[in-house]
Each structure stands twice: as structure tokens, then as C-alpha cells.
Image: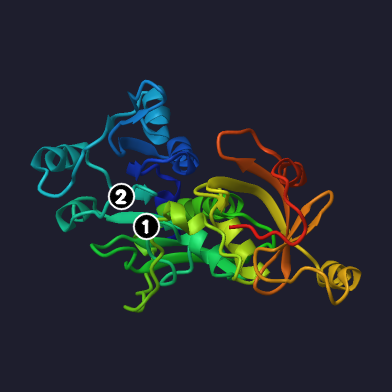
Amino acid sequence: MTNETISTHANRPRRVAFFGSPAWAVPVLEALYRQHQVVLVVTQPDKPAGRGLKLTPCPVAAWAEAQGLRVEKPAKLRKNLEFMELFREMGPEVAVTAAYGKILPAELLAIPRFGFLNLHPSDLPKYRGPAPVQWTLIHGETEAAVCIMQTDVGMDTGPVVARWRTPVGPDETAVELSNRLRDKGIELLLEALADLEHLQPQPQPPEGTHAPMLQKDHGKIAWERSADEIYNRHRGVQPWPGSWFEHQGRRVKVLRMSKATLEQTLEYRHGQGPGGPSLEPGTVLRIADELMVAAGQGSLLLQEVQPEGKKPMPAADWARGARLRMGDRLG
């Protein structure tokens, strides 16, 4: 194939179908809309939202409908002959998925000439599944990645066509890292679409790690963990379920926290002397501008909390209002 032919492929808009649902995926669709012909957008069905539980489209569907794009919201894909026929009629050359949330059946994957490409924010085969960035941070990884993968019938097991690795910032949250990886992933995706005829997929090893959907209890602070582990988990569970603990039977959400330095912990020890409060996990060590709490190893500084049923407030103000004293233990 001549260089002139390759250049023609690179500049030609592709007929693309897009599968995605949450707000995180909207910039991916926007980029495709600007450079390619988006013939179909597929999202999760509308869900009840708000006080009136009115059926509401997901962010991707809302954006696509506003642009006048064809949007379909099938409740299921497997054995959905009506949707399969529609998808075939729309004639996509390639399909792109980004946080769609469903396993795609083999008969659907076979329809586009160039198959499906998935934007996945992890260093595959690490962290396959729906919450890769969250578990990357919870496990204290210092490096993350985004991959463009050819989708197969497994969960994030297809061959990788592009990969970009990056250091993880020490205070970077799941929201920040997810967005940064997505934005770089968009660049990789557009490059792959420009060169579909010459991609060189690299098979993944069969064994990998799974990143399951977060549950509410994943945000519960276990004070017996080290300060590093608690802080890493706090970064990973943003914005949901967030970090929280219970005090006197009521949940208190921790909106902002940091790790105390070794000097701050040693200063506390020195100031209390041998008869001072213990450093058992969960012990309140200091109530000043911040609330200092002992962990299994090291200690944490709580800056902002939100007690159940109340507005966010400085953690020290909450502690004083709750009549906490140094040496008390949080539940």
C-alpha cells in the first residue's frame, strides 16, 4: 500500500457507532462527533432521578440527543434481534465503547468491519472491570495507564492497540486521574481510528486482576489500617461512596483529609508524655485547626466532614460540637 493510500485513510471520516453512558464518556463522544460521522449512539436506558423519580436520560444520551444524533437505549443486547438488525442497517465501520457497562455479545462484535475499540483507563491486564482507576488508587499504585483495546467477548480481555503510562500524583483523586487518563485516551483513540487498516494488536496475558464496582462499605474507614492505606482509599473512593466513619450511631463523611507528617505525630507524642492518651487506631490525638486521628501506623488530619443530615463543616468544629476530647476513639 502506498503512502498516498495511507494518507487517504488517515484523513477520511469513519462511520462510527458509540457505546457509553456516564458524564465521563461525553468528551469521548464529542471528539468523535467533531472528526467522524457518528451514525449511532447506544446508552443505558433512562433511569429514575430526582425527588419525583422522573425517567431521565444518562449524560451521553442527553448530549447526543441535543446534537440530533440517533440514540438507542436497549435494555439488553443478547438475543435482541431488533437492535441487531438496526445496528447492521446503520452500517458502522467501527464501534467505540467508553464506560458503557454491558458485556457485548459476539454476534454484535462481528458486525463492524473493524470491530469495536474500547477506551479503558488501566494498565491491562491489571484492573479489568468497571472501576479500574478507583482500585489503582486504593491499592496505592504509583503508575497508571490508559489502553485502547479491541473488544472481545471477555471482560476487558481483548488485544491492546495503544497504551500510555503515567505516574500517579501523590494526592491525585479518582476523579482527577480518571479525567486525565480519558483525555489522553481520546488522543490514542483518534490516532487508532486514523489508521484502522494498519493496527497491530498485542494480545493480553490470560491472567489479570479484577476491579469490581465499588460498594458503599468500600468507603468505610478502618482506622487499624495504616495512614497511607486509609489516605489511598480516600483518594480512590471519590466521589462515591466517599470516606466515612460512624460516631454514636451516625455516619460522618470525610470530605477532605491528609496524612500527618512524622514530625506532627512525634510532636504529639512528645507533648503528651508517658501518661498521655494512647495511640490506638481511631484515637483523637488533637483538636486544633484540624482533627488529628491515630491510624494503625501513623496518623491522619481530617479537615472537612459532613455529619449525616447536615452541611459540610470544618472537622475541628464538628469535633467540638460532638464534645469529643483528646483520647476519645472514633467508631
Amino acid found under the numbered disc labelled 1: Leu
Q: As displayed, is residue 52 above or below residue 275? A: above
Question: What is the total number of numbered labels drawn onto the structure image?
Answer: 2
Q: Residues within 10 Å of mark 1 (few under 14, many from 20)?
A: some
Q: Locate residue 229, reporting x and y percent.
A: 61, 69
Residue wearing tag 1: 196
Amino acid found under the numbered disc labelled 2: Val
Q: As displayed, is residue 71 above or below residue 250? A: above
* Most foreground residue, 235 or 220: 220
Q: Residue at x 25, y 35 (%)?
A: 73
Q: Is residue 1 visible?
A: no
* Most foreground residue, 7 or 126: 126
Q: Quadrant of residue 54?
A: top left
Q: Locate residue 214, reporting x and y percent.
A: 43, 55
* Most foreground residue, 145 or 270: 270
Quarter occupied by the N terminus: bottom left
* Residue 40 relative to residue 199: left or right: left
